[in-house]
Image (spheres, grey):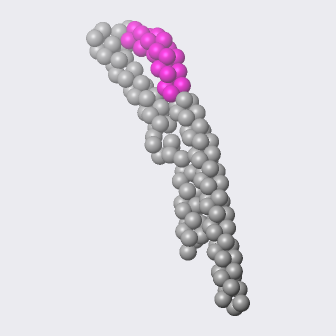
Amino acid sequence: MSIQGDLRGTQNDLRAISGLMGDALSQFAKLFQNEVDLAKAELGEKVQHVGLAIGFIAGGAILVMPAIVLALMALAAALIAAGWSQPVSYLLSAFLAAVIAAVLFAVGINRLAPRRLAPRETMRQLERDKDAVKGMVR
């Protein structure tokens, strides 16, 4: 009887261990799904951020053109009226336009920097989950 009792106890222990493993795997699957959902949400925000940055770049490029052309024409006309030669006046106006364009593009590109687009919260949460899974396995 003692051997049969030991066998039943061992079988019950194995069922309990397999149940615990099943629960752990189930919770790990839920945790993984939650992380996937978090990553989707965060990447959705990043895509929106990229779209907004591209909108700024395009808007800046489109809306500034007429204003720059008129301002450059006025600057060149003022320089010519002040006694500067026509080629130098136009060249100076073109240089000013290039500087303004460089600033606009730099702002837009800065908004697209990889460090600003990385899903930091998801990466941090994945590190926590990895540590939690390591703790469960021990």
Q: Where is residue 129 in the image (x, y as percent from the top left)?
A: 58, 61
Q: Position of residue 80 (x, y in %)?
A: 35, 9
- Write the residue at 69% across / 76% down: 12
- Write the residue at 63% across / 69% down: 18
- Write the residue at 65% across / 60% down: 27
Quarter of the picture holding the C terminus? bottom right
- Write the residue at 69% across / 82% down: 9
- The answer to whether residue 13 is seen in the rendering is no
- The answer to whether residue 118 is seen in the rendering is yes
User: Left of 101 or right of it: where is 132?
Assistant: right
Task: Report the magenta residues as a range.
Answer: 54-77
Asked if 22 appears above or below 65 in the picture, the reply is: below
User: Left of 124 or right of it: where is 89?
Assistant: left
Asked if 118 appears above or below 111 in the picture, the reply is: below
Asked if 85 appears above or below 55 in the picture, the reply is: above
Q: Is residue 1 magenta?
A: no
Give whichever of 4, 21 is nearer the camera: 4
Give whichever of 133, 53 is nearer the camera: 133
Count every numbered label the image shows and give the total: 0
Main SS class of the magenta portion in the image? helix
Quarter of the picture holding the N terminus? bottom right
Q: Position of residue 73 (x, y in %)?
A: 42, 10
Asked if 75 appears above or below 110 in the picture, the reply is: above
Give whichever of 50, 131 is nearer the camera: 131
In this view, the residue farthest toward the front is 1
Q: Does the magenta stretch include residue 65?
A: yes
Q: Where is residue 123 in the image (x, y as percent from the top left)?
A: 53, 53
User: Left of 25 or right of it: where is 102?
Assistant: left
**Res. 42 image quadrant:** top right
